[in-house]
Image (spheres, rainbow, N blue to C red):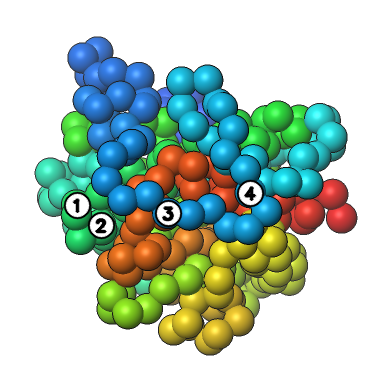
Amino acid sequence: MPLPSRLIVTCTLVAAVLMIPPVTAKPDPADAAPGSARTGAVEPTGGPTAALPAGTTAVSGGARTAAARVGSARPRGVLAGKVVVIDPGHQLGNSRHPRQVRRLVDAGGFRKACNTTGTQTNSGYPEATFTFSTARHLKARLEARGARVYLTRTRNSVKAWGPCIDVRGRFAASVHADALVSVHADGTASDRRGFFVIRPADRKGWTRDIYRESRVLSLDVRAGLRGAGLDYADYVGGDGLDTRGDLGTLNWSDVPAVMVELGNMRNRRDAARMRDARWRSGVYAEGLADGLTRFLTR
């Protein structure tokens, strides 16, 4: 039986992914550290804020305000020995590099664009910045529980683009991850709101080997987000779940993988929550951390 095409990956490619940051643009020394206004990853403090879900309490978090959900604490070390890859969707500079981003790549036996620009709120807050901020909060929570965590991109900058969807999907196996979660936000009709979790379809030669475990992961992540006080999307199935076979990041993954759409950036209520650092840290990231912990400690 011929090997599935996604397994034919050379050692050179794997080594390259591990040796360099997963950002295709050449690093610029002028770039500030993640979280600065220069990178676009600044956490807005002005504008409308959203009330936290019942059962959450605003607490001091050093230089920034976070939210701690009552009863959400987990013993330190519960994820010791586990490896997680977080994929912050898109990149802030994708729109400035159309030639690179529109280049077609193998997305799982068919061709799709390397990446896209993502969406934004009506006030201009980018999906790439939201996903990167949430991913960093999630990384901190998982590491506090003992996990080793990698990001598929290590900065959020208008000078950077990518990585492509196939590189994002393959990266998890190259670091021997136990799970991959790709963090996104939707941009649909403004009267729609809520989150949903996308799991890969059962595709022979591509996702069949991870399909069942990815289904379990999707249920656990959904439970974590629901437990954090988030509502299921009111426009995709109604149960907070979706299955797709056309997403390159999921198709290329060799470990259990899901993609989460944490809300609709075009919806006023969801957008206010996404712009609020307390929600990114204490609700979105905490819910994802709880869902991943549930899956990784089964």
* Residue drawn where x is 55% and y is 26% of the image: 61
On residue 120, which mark appears? 2
Label 3 crowd bin: few (<14), some (14–19), many (20+), radius 10 Å: some
Residue located beneath label 3 in the image: 50
Provide the secondary structure element on which disc 4 rests: strand
Q: Quadrant of the C terminus?
A: bottom right
Residue located beneath label 4 in the image: 56
Contact, mark 2 vs mark 1 (Cβ under 8 Å):
yes
Residue 254 as seen in the image, left or right of residue 250 = right
Provide the secondary structure element on which disc 2 rests: loop
Label 2 crowd bin: few (<14), some (14–19), many (20+), radius 10 Å: many
On residue 124, which mark appears? 1
* Residue drawn where x is 39% and y is 63% of the image: 270
Q: Earlier in the sequence, mark 4 or mark 1?
A: 4
Of tags 3 and 1, the one toward the viewer is: 3
Residue 100 as seen in the image, left or right of residue 202 = left
Provide the secondary structure element on which disc 1 rests: loop
Of tags 2 and 4, the one toward the viewer is: 4
Q: Is residue 131 visible?
A: yes
Q: Earlier in the sequence, mark 3 or mark 1?
A: 3
Contact, mark 3 vs mark 1 (Cβ under 8 Å):
no
Of tags 3 and 2, the one toward the viewer is: 3
State the CA–CA distance, disc 3 to disc 1. Answer: 17 Å
